[in-house]
Image (cartoon, helix red, strand yellow):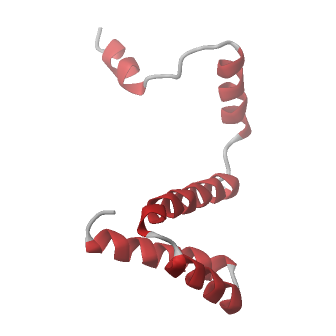
Amino acid sequence: MGSCFDLIFFILLLYYFLYLIMTATTLKHVNDKLKSLPDSLINEVESFIDFLAYKHSQETNQIPQWHKEEVAKRIKLNKKPVDAFEMIDNLDK
């Protein structure tokens, strides 16, 4: 995996995430399962937790309707994403 700090950070993040959504009993069961996993699967578990955290943040984030419509339109028309840096460069020309 990485350094000891990375592992500690991962464990703290995991506990925080679990604390927010699970009961104490469930937390104990998950903790026991994590302890039984081989080291080779820890990165996979960490990636999945990151995915869940990202998914949750997207669901709770209030994205304006106009932004959703613009993204949907660009996808439908197969347009490339807007490059803000390119736009800024073009302003100077």
Q: Position of residue 51 (x, y in %)?
A: 57, 55
For the point 56% across and 63% down, the residue is: 49
For the point 31% across and 17% down, the residue is: 89
28 left or right of 47? right
For the point 50% across and 22% down, the residue is: 82
Q: Quadrant of residue 53 in the image?
A: bottom right
Of residues 62 and 59, the one nearer the viewer is 59
Q: Position of residue 8 (x, y in %)?
A: 36, 77
Q: The C terminus lies in which quarter of the figure?
A: top left
- Disc tally is 0
21 left or right of 7? right
Of residues 26 and 20, the one nearer the viewer is 26
The relative height of residue 80 versus residue 69 in the rendered view (above or below) is: above
Of residues 31 and 72, the one nearer the viewer is 31
For the point 44% across and 76% down, the residue is: 11
Q: Position of residue 2 (x, y in %)?
A: 29, 63
Of residues 2 and 58, the one nearer the viewer is 2
Q: Quadrant of residue 20 in the image?
A: bottom right
Q: Quadrant of residue 91 in the image?
A: top left
Q: Report the residue that reaches farthest toward the top.
A: 93
69 left or right of 8? right
Q: The N terminus lies in which quarter of the figure?
A: bottom left
The relative height of residue 93 versus residue 62 in the rendered view (above or below) is: above
Q: Report the residue that reaches farthest toward the left.
A: 3
Q: Position of residue 52 (x, y in %)?
A: 61, 59
83 left or right of 71? left
